[in-house]
Image (tube, helix red, strand yellow):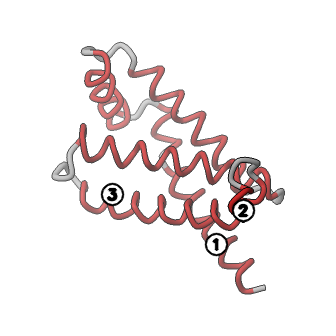
Amino acid sequence: MKTTVIFLILRILVAIVLAQSLFFTFTGAEESVQLFSQLSNTLKGDASLEGLLRIGSGVVELVSVTLLLMKKPAAISVGALMAVGIMFGVIMAQVTVIGIDSAGGRTLLIIEGFTLLASLVVLFRFRGSVPFLGKFT
């Protein structure tokens, strides 16, 4: 019973961290546009991919949040797997493109690291629901 509650809390915390950025991502907040312009610039050499990257990542985050909050273990495991990928990408972008010394960079990195770790714990717990991870149960 206690472990069920702990995993529910971890799922909710990961979902909150991912969901809190969705408003800024979908409304085109200045910080979000600037971030994805910087990423696009790094990838392509100009900012033309900004909108596609921003909205695309927002949709992926929204799907991950939705799956994490479902009751079916298969949905939870896919949502956790997506969250691991999202957070790994966010951390890599923070370290390589945006910079740790940017405004709030260190605090964000700690939150991102916690979220990645929590996503990995949830994924490990529900690994039996993912066919290629189920072999390790």
The residue shown at (24%, 41%) is: 96
The residue shown at (68%, 53%) is: 133
Residue 59: x percent and y percent? 60, 33
User: Residue at label 1?
Assistant: 9
SS under mark 2: loop
Which is nearer the eye, 118 or 23? 118
SS under mark 3: helix
Please state which of the two labelled residues, at mark 3 or mark 2, is closer to the viewer: 2
What's the residue type where badge 2 is placed?
A: Phe
Q: Is residue 95 left or right of residue 71?
A: left
Q: Could you say which quadrant of the image residue 49 lies in? A: top left
Does 63 sit above or below residue 65?
above
The residue shown at (32%, 58%) is: 109
Does 47 sit above or below residue 56?
above
User: Residue at label 3?
Assistant: 108
Give the numbered dot on residue 126: 2
SS under mark 1: helix
